[in-house]
Image (spheres, rainbow, N blue to C red):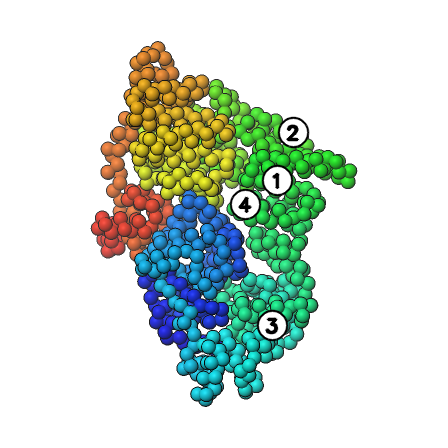
Amino acid sequence: MNQLILPRKQIDFQLKEMFDHPLTLVTAAMGYGKTTAVRHFLDQYHTRYLWLNVETDETSAPNIWHSLTRQLTKIEPAFGKQLNTLGFPSDSAQRERVLDYIEDHVYGTNTVMVLDDYHHVYASEVDELMERIVRKAIPGFHVVLISRVRPRFGVEELVTKGLCLQLKNVLFELSSDEILEFFRLYGYDLSDDSIMQVYEVTEGWITAVYLMMKSYAETGTFDYETDINSLLEQAIITQYTMDETNLLAALSYLDSFTPRQAVFVTGMRDAAKVIRKICCDNSLIHYNGQAGNYKMHNILVGYLQENWVVHFQKYDLAGFYRRAGEWEVKNHNLLAGLQYFLKAKEYDLILKEFEKPGITRVIDTAPIEIVAIFEQVPKEVRYRHPMGYITYADFFLTDIDMEAGTQLLDEIELYYSNNPGTSLTLKRQIFGEITLVRSFSHFNDMRKMSELHVQAYELLGGRSSIANRDMVFTFGSPHSQYLFYREKGDLWGITEYSDRAIRYYQELSDGCGAGFGHLSRAEYYLETGSLDQVEPYARKAIYKAQTMDQLSVILCARFTLARWYAARGQFVKARKELCDLSVMVEESHNPILNSTLELCYGYLGGILGDATDFTSWLREGDMQQSDIFYQGMGFNYLVHAKYVLLEADYLKLEMLCEQLCQVFSIFNNLLGYVHAYILEAIAKEKTYGFTEAKETLLLALDIGRADGLILPFAEYGMYIGELLQSLHQENPGDEYLGKLDKAAEQYRKNLQHYQKDLKKEAVLTPREKEILCLVIEGNTNREIADRLFIAQVTVKKTVTSIYRKLEVNGRAAAVRKALELGLDAEEASSKEDY
């Protein structure tokens, strides 16, 4: 008996309205056919949709995100992979980035994204994200939430504002007429009395109606006294052999499954064939053609698991979970695999994954989940896998808490020091890895870190099994010298030492940090105003970093070049440098480096006086959970302060500078202090006058003089030019002040000249107009590239340029601005030829 679908005209009529709302909320109790009705409607109207399932009760937002984006990857690989790699957007920066990415992908495409079984979501962060997506109201993008209960966000307000369409439980109850039609679908023409009895027993619950129909098909009679479990057993389970039922019972412990996965986790060679046979006439097992997997209805899952202990002893559940974990790991879903291993209590397998290369990419995107998993691993198991345990300690020290991570290393070292069963060779390796990881507990003391690198190198024979080139060497800071410059008068000292400092670590880690020595010199010459020396070293840093895929070093080097162009008055080239860099960073799908790039844009925007270069998290100063590692966190505050300066909120800026100094005191970031004192001097000059401003500026000059810093002062030439000029007039013989006065004056003149030319530069080129017209039509970047026979990377660069010229962020804002300016899709027909 094939599965047949009952047309639901009333439901279809209401669902047509989903295209007028960003959100459609479908709520009804379990078994009322919500999923079938929505999917049938979307298929019937040939709608472009993305169907995702919240597969199980979950309180962790990153776990939910990982599951949904993993499913999305099977439907739209590039889109899903990028969102999966970015990780759940737990802070403002990442939320904005994810929303912009979704908008860029779906704008104007009339796409419906369905989240089925949304009632499994018990994470308020996911609810908040969904509400933000809905409120963004991306044209041509519609979200459908299918749930047993109303979501835990402001549905009433969304409905009032016309942002949400609701379909409630009563709509899904079958009428007596619909029950009659349902039975006729399967070839049974019942009497009016029989239909009314079925209606009274089931109260319109379609699952019960379906099971009664299946039972009637087998026996030719109705048993009106049977409960749902008995009805399910009579109508469905009795049709299957014990092996088939055992297979279903085993698979009920998976959120969803593919035929190949079923073969692997159950060990039954004919599992795929059995599944296809069973699903042909079982409406409680649904096949998702987009994802290529099957999902059981919760009613069937509940029945099978409730009866597992009584009837189904064939499978060992722990072994089943172990194989499920192995399947996920094999298919590059490491986080899901670790969670299955945890269910199976296969703690050794968890540690073995920590011993493998590539674990860094996973733990950096899901730190909270990794800690939650690892905390449940018994200590004795951890000590059986020293390299895996030290890898975890490394992650904890650099990502979570330096002090607690250091204590963890001490415990591991003490255990193996006193363990007679550990061979001398293994002890040497363990102590070498611990020494290497411990170097990060002395973060930004370059010489102490290097000393420990040498010791680790000798103990390990030149190669670590833990350190690798996947690590973000710069900790997310766009400026490496910002991290390590901590003593006055030592800027050249650490620059000169950088080559030696990185040499041993680079070899131990198979290339992590390649190019750092050249980068240090480029940054040194930039900060000290020796502009002729900057470009050669920056280019060398980029070249060397490229050989080892060190994008974090490349990013710092190109940010250095952008500031170098700006220092020479070539502001358009400075912008282009960051524009080209943005394409490279976006393709890396690295949330840490995405945040770093946003810092670069904000920093340059602060110089150019362009507030649109600041993302919302930098405008608002939301630093609570930034993607940047805590070692580079202070740079976030610095860029936020630049935005406050643009807003001319000088009282706020003065207060913020006190906070900046507290942040910079943690690692004594002297470049941070210089900027903080300059910004505070600007605030005080505007609020209190020259005298107090000079006193504060002298604090910055005290640090700057010791190392010949020029550019940090010159970049604020528009604000502190008169202050520097006054100080120089008071001290005419001060050569350093003379250099600063001259550099700041030249920078100010260059900026004034640039700002005069801004209107000319802001005019869209014919190619930009052409691409903007295609954006207005709703084309994605890929579709635009195909249509114009150009590379997708070219489209990305052009779209970024359009955003900047229109002073907007995102596709929807660009379209609105274009329409306000009178540019519409019709202009595409009159565009110039190329």
Q: Quick check: can you spot residue 563?
A: no
Q: What label does residue 367 carry, if any?
A: 4
Which residue sits furthest left?
Answer: 822
* Label 4 – label 2 distance at C-alpha: 29 Å
Q: Quadrant of residue 696?
A: top left
Tell me which amino acid carries mark 4. Pro
Question: Gap between marks 2 and 3, in whole Å?
Answer: 60 Å
Q: Amino acid at mark 2?
A: Gln
Q: Quadrant of residue 606?
A: top left
| Residue identifier under label 3 | 274
For label 1, the residue is: 393
Comes first in the chain, label 3 or label 4 = 3
Vertical comparison of 330 with 310: above or below:
above
Q: Give the distance between the C-alpha atoms of the residues marked 2 and 1, in whole angstroms.
A: 19 Å
Locate residue 812 relative to residue 417 in the image: left or right. Answer: left
Q: At x 29% / y 54%, what residue is drawn?
A: 776
Q: Nearer the viewer, residue 365 or 569?
A: 365
Q: Nearer the viewer, mark 2 or mark 1?
A: 1
Q: Amino acid at mark 3?
A: Val
| Residue annotated with mark 2 | 455
